[in-house]
Image (tube, rainbow, N blue to C red):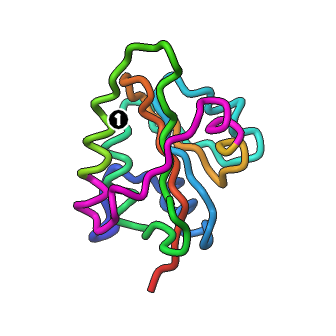
Amino acid sequence: MLKGVPAILSPQLLKVLCEMGHGDEIVIADGNFPAESMGKDAVVIRADGHGVPEILDAVLKMIPLDQYVETPAALMEVVPGDDCVPVIWEQYRALLEENGEDPARIEMMERFAFYERAKKAYAIVATGESAIYANILLKKGVVK
């Protein structure tokens, strides 16, 4: 046990967050995201039974986002013609703000562009999140 570390962060996820350097990216994925196929060149961490907001909050307590890029966070935009309204995004913006990050610095990415970027991520956290369009990508910044 460690003091001050959110209990939801597994030892494997803590290790990955420590290993990541400035500019490395991590995807916190919903339960529908093809984590294993997208993460063939990444560390895939299973967090089944947990939602994206809880993992996101804990990760943001451990790492800053990249202050040298315009958008250090990215979301998969809704596919044209899909009538889904991802209300979970407002939760993400609130968590970013609560953790000292600017919620306006989020890039909206087309689905397949998001997948291509996710393939290059350092790690993918596969959660059991049931909300759709709930994937979020973070670019790690510099710890000062």
Q: Is residue 82 left or right of residue 2?
A: right
- The residue range painted magenta reads 95-116
Q: Residue at x 53, y 63 (%)?
A: 17
> Can residue 1 be seen at all in this image of the molecule?
no
User: 10 Å neighbourhood of mark 1: few (<14), some, or many (≥20)?
Assistant: many
Image coordinates of residue 107 in percent, x first then y, are 50, 49
Image coordinates of residue 42 in percent, x first then y, are 70, 47
Q: Residue at x 46, y 30 (%)?
A: 30
Q: Residue at x 31, y 57 (%)?
A: 96
Quadrant of the rendering where the N terminus is positioned? bottom left
The amino acid type, in three-letter code, at marker 1 is Gly
User: In the rendered image, which residue does mark 1 sit on?
Assistant: 51
107 is within the stretch colored magenta:
yes
> Can residue 68 be seen at all in this image of the molecule?
yes
Foreground residue among 54 and 90? 90
Q: Residue at x 62, y 67 (%)?
A: 23
Foreground residue among 51 and 86? 86
Residue 87 vertical placement versus 73 (above, below): above
Quadrant of the rendering where the C terminus is positioned? bottom left
65 is within the stretch colored magenta:
no
Element class at badge 1: loop
Residue 54 vertical placement versus 83 (above, below): below
